[in-house]
Image (spheres, rainbow, N blue to C red):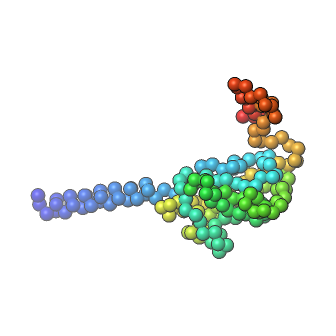
Amino acid sequence: MNKPASKRSSYIRSFIIVFILLGAASATAQAPSVVATIPPNGAFGVRPDLDAILITFDKPMTWPNLTPANKCYSISGSWGTPVIIKAPWHDDNIVRIGREGGEFVFLNRSDLPAGSVISLTLNPPGASSECFRDKEGNLLPPFDLSFTVRQNPSDPPLEPQVISTNPAKWSHDGGPQHRLCLDNI
């Protein structure tokens, strides 16, 4: 083999190796994403006594450095003081954003204002690189969530409600079959 052909072959092999390595690096460097929220994004008629937003990511996440200077999230003022919790019983891909007076804070919490729109942004523009990221260090792109609180307390709920049970409430005769009927599943 002559020298120019050898150099060309070596160059092509090097190019192929670099291409494969870059492809592998980009495949593993995929940014995390949000796969589900409770309440759902865009929901209308959310209960005014909602005490937390649950966010599920597509992969395990590291706990963000939530100092105010990092600006890891922004949330509507009507939500009240947020309490961001990585509950030990949740997987590493679920984060709970509670409200002051919620399950972990022993204060009286007022209902969300009727008809209010609650907006939440994780990793808003200008957020620190120490915010919401996966275990490989890939940052979550800015994620926006909003929902609307029901207009009137008497509005029908969006969530399923128990309308009857068999056996009836407080019955001591369970019998061989038990039934639970839900209204809007």
**Camera-side residue of 96 and 30:** 96
**Camera-side residue of 156 and 160:** 160
The residue sitting at 72% across, 55% down in the picture is: 52
The residue sitting at 78% across, 55% down in the picture is: 117
Q: Would you say residue 144 is visible in this rendering? A: no
Q: Residue furthest bottom?
A: 69
Q: Position of residue 8 (x, y in %)?
A: 21, 60
The residue sitting at 72% across, 34% down in the picture is: 185
Residue 139: image quadrant is bottom right
Q: Would you say residue 56 is visible in this rendering? A: yes
Q: Position of residue 54 (x, y in %)?
A: 67, 53
Position of the N terminus by quadrant: bottom left
**Camera-side residue of 105 and 118:** 105
Q: Position of residue 104 (x, y in %)?
A: 72, 60
Q: Residue furthest left?
A: 1
Residue 20: image quadrant is bottom left
Q: Is residue 53 left or right of residue 21?
A: right
Q: Residue furthest front?
A: 172
Q: Position of residue 183 (x, y in %)?
A: 77, 33
Compared with residue 161, is residue 29 higher up or lower down, i.e. above or below? below
The residue sitting at 74% across, 47% down in the picture is: 43
The image shows a total of numbered marks equal to: 0
